[in-house]
């Protein structure tokens, strides 16, 4: 079949989503139908760079391909976004209703310096960290690559794509390394020079500690940043807070993080959610500093964000500051994560179907 000889095939099942195709796979699909592979480059540029979703207006494509494109791949976003703004207008929570009725949440956070898009990798999560709203839901299902890419597109659309440079963090719902294939495919699509051309250095994947998958990710050479959700400095406490620690304890996790950092040449972020009276003692700070020094890393402190039904306490600002001060002289880089979107149930660990008021 040639480029011009595409035939409409009435009654075909709904076509797969465009947003799940890497450029290579789209070219393969075109190739099977006799459409030259370079047409995939053109379609990618139209959609991701010129923000064009109407195939009929893709003027450099032959008329036959224009009229057939949506039956080869669906250009509509897989899911309808609803948007909720925080009171200061800097944070937005996006709720995407997916085709099977599943709901996925994503959050955009603006600071003076940059826009950060926090995306989800699963609906719910199986890992049941003891302070996380997503964990309370249990795992509903993995997201497909197109459903991950769609979160970014929905947030970019909402911001009118005014920010050419933004960061993506896989810190929404779910454990990204438990859905590695779809997450990596989404990263490749977002990274593509004919796609959003988003540098791998602008993408960070956060894990609660799936050691074999950290090693697998290193082999894939995607160069994305790694954040490790540490949250405790002894295995005894981490076993309780992050149950996956029973399978891969702290020493193994930090070994894998070190190897990952060496392979991609990037510092690992150690995330540490501060729970008042639980993991915020000076002895914890000292042990955390030791871990942080032992590998190229930066430490990100996250004061606990309340989750209804859970009894943990957020430490006072003074206690957070005291913990950070204890770390500063000894740890390579320490930041305290501002609470973004608390009034939207959109802060870290609060994504779990909780409604904005
Ligand atoms: N599943 C991944 C990424 C999503 S959560 C992971 O666990 O790393 C993003 C970060 O928020 C993680 O470090 C997570 O442990 C933390 N977190 C979860 N619940 C929280 C809460 N209630 N308050 C503060 N941080 C929380
Ligand atoms: Fe899952 Fe991360 Fe929540 Fe743990 S913190 S339950 S891994 S989403």
Image: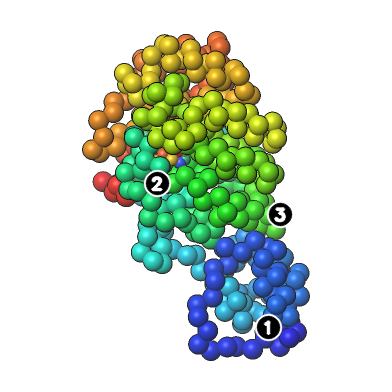
- Judge whether 240 appears above or below 198 on screen: above
Contact (Cβ within 8 Å) of mark 2 with mark 3: no
Q: Quadrant of the N terminus?
A: bottom right
Q: Earlier in the sequence, mark 1 or mark 2?
A: 1
Looking at the rendered structure, which numbered label has been put on residue 63?
A: 1
Task: Provide the residue designation for mark 3.
Answer: 193
- Looking at the rendered image, the disc whose residue lies closer to the viewer, 2 or 3, is 2
SS at mark 2?
A: loop
Residue found 69% across the figure and 36% down from its top: 264
The quadrant where ligand 2 appears is top left
SS at mark 1?
A: helix
- Ligand 1 within 8 Å of the CB at mark 3: no
Q: Earlier in the sequence, mark 2 or mark 3?
A: 2
Looking at the rendered structure, which numbered label has been put on residue 126?
A: 2
Of the pair 14 and 252, the residue shown nearer to us: 252
Q: Earlier in the sequence, mark 3 or mark 1?
A: 1
User: On the picture, is 130 further left or further right than 74?
Assistant: left
Of the pair 115 and 186, the residue shown nearer to us: 186
Residue found 38% across the figure and 14% down from its top: 281
């Amino acid at each position: 079949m040639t480029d011009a000889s595409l035939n409409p095939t009435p009654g075909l099942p709904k076509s797969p989503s465009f947003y799940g195709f890497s450029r290579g796979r789209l070219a393969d699909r075109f190739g099977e139908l006799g459409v030259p592979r370079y047409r995939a480059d053109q379609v990618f540029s139209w959609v991701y760079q010129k923000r064009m979703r109407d195939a009929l207006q893709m003027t450099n494509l032959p008329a036959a391909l224009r009229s057939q494109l949506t039956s080869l791949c669906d250009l509509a976003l897989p899911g309808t976004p609803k948007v909720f703004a925080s009171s200061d207008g800097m944070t937005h929570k996006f709720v995407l209703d997916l085709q099977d009725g599943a709901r996925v949440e994503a959050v955009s956070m603006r600071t003076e310096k940059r826009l950060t898009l926090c995306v989800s990798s699963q609906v719910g999560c199986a890992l049941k960290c003891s302070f996380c709203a997503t964990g309370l839901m249990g795992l509903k299902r993995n997201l497909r690559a197109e459903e991950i890419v769609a979160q970014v597109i929905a947030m970019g659309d909402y911001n009118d794509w005014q920010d050419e440079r933004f960061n993506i963090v896989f810190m929404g719902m779910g454990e990204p390394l438990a859905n590695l294939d779809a997450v990596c495919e989404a990263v490749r699509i977002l990274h593509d020079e004919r796609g959003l051309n988003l540098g791998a250095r602008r993408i960070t994947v956060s894990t609660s500690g799936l050691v074999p998958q950290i090693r697998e990710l290193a082999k894939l050479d995607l160069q994305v940043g790694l954040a490790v959700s540490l949250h405790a400095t002894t295995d005894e406490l981490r076993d309780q807070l992050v149950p996956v620690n029973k399978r891969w304890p702290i020493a193994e996790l930090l070994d894998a993080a070190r190897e990952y950092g060496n392979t991609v040449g990037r510092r690992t972020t150690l995330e540490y959610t501060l729970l008042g009276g639980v993991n915020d003692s000076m002895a914890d700070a000292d042990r955390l500093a030791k871990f942080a020094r032992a590998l190229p890393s930066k430490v990100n402190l996250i004061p606990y964000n309340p989750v209804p039904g859970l009894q943990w306490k957020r430490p006072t600002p003074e206690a957070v500051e005291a913990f950070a001060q204890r770390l500063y002289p000894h740890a390579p880089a320490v930041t305290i994560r501002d609470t973004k979107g608390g009034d939207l149930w959109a802060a870290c660990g609060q994504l779990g179907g909780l409604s904005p008021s």
